[in-house]
Amino acid sequence: MQALIFRFFDICILRAGPQDLPSSLFLLRLIVVLGVVVGTIMYLPMKGFSQSLAISLFGAVFLTAFLYIGLKLRNKLARFRQTVIAAMGTGIILDFVMMPFEYTRLAAQLDGESSPIAFQMVLLTLFWSITVFAHIIRHSFEIRFGYGFIVSVGYVVLFLMLANLVFTV
């Protein structure tokens, strides 16, 4: 398990790719459940439990569908499990990195203050998340990093638009 966690860190620093992860159905299920739990915790102070869980479940389903469709279009469906495991696993790590900054930013906002450093760290972590996702997309779809980055940004924009429509995030 420790080796797997280190592999997720390697992907986060762009040293490894999704192809370096096992294609295990058990691991896929475990990582998706953990991703939903961590996502729920991430949104909890802002949205309450029910809406946090719903947003997190929506995110997991949207990510899975996005990757499935993209891999199917590229005729790379055999990479589906590893790609979802990589995206969700690195997402968990990056959510844990972002969480203290997001909570600090939210606490300052509730006190009527601002926390520019926390906000900048949230933005930096978001940018790094997009970069890591682009790296995963690049390997899984076998495309150039720049195209992976465009796909990554498109994914984030589409997710935020749909989540805003459904949940008014």
Image: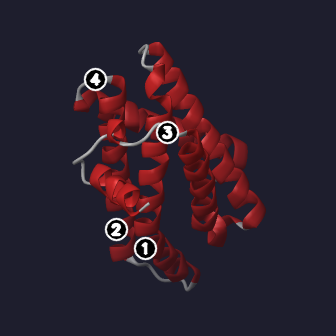
Q: Nearer the viewer, mark 1 or mark 4?
A: 4
The quarter of the rendered structure image containing the N terminus is bottom left
**Which of 46/54 is in front?**
54
Q: Amino acid at mark 4?
A: Ile
Residue at point 51% right, 75% down?
Answer: 103
Q: Nearer the viewer, mark 4 or mark 3?
A: 3
Residue 22's spot in the image, x, y percent? 43, 41
**Which of 44/7 is in front?**
7
Residue at point 30% right, 40% down?
Answer: 17
Q: CA distance from mark 4 to mark 2?
A: 29 Å
Q: CA distance from mark 1 to mark 4?
A: 33 Å
Lower sequence index among marks 1 and 4: 1
Let me know if residue 168 appears in the view: no
As drawn, 76 above or below 47 = above
Residue that numbered label 1 is attached to: 101
Lower sequence index among marks 3 and 2: 3
Let me know if residue 33 appears in the view: yes
Q: CA distance from mark 4 to mark 3?
A: 17 Å
Q: Amino acid at mark 2?
A: Met
Q: Amino acid at mark 3?
A: Val
Residue 156's spot in the image, x, y percent? 47, 41
Q: Which label number is shown at residue 84? A: 3
**Which of 37/50 is in front?**
37
Q: CA distance from mark 1 to mark 3?
A: 26 Å
Q: Amino acid at mark 1?
A: Phe
Lower sequence index among marks 4 and 2: 2
Residue that numbered label 2 is attached to: 121
Q: CA distance from mark 3 to mark 2?
A: 26 Å
Q: Residues within 10 Å of mark 1 (few under 14, many from 20)?
A: many
- Residues marked 1 and 2 touching at CB (< 8 Å): yes
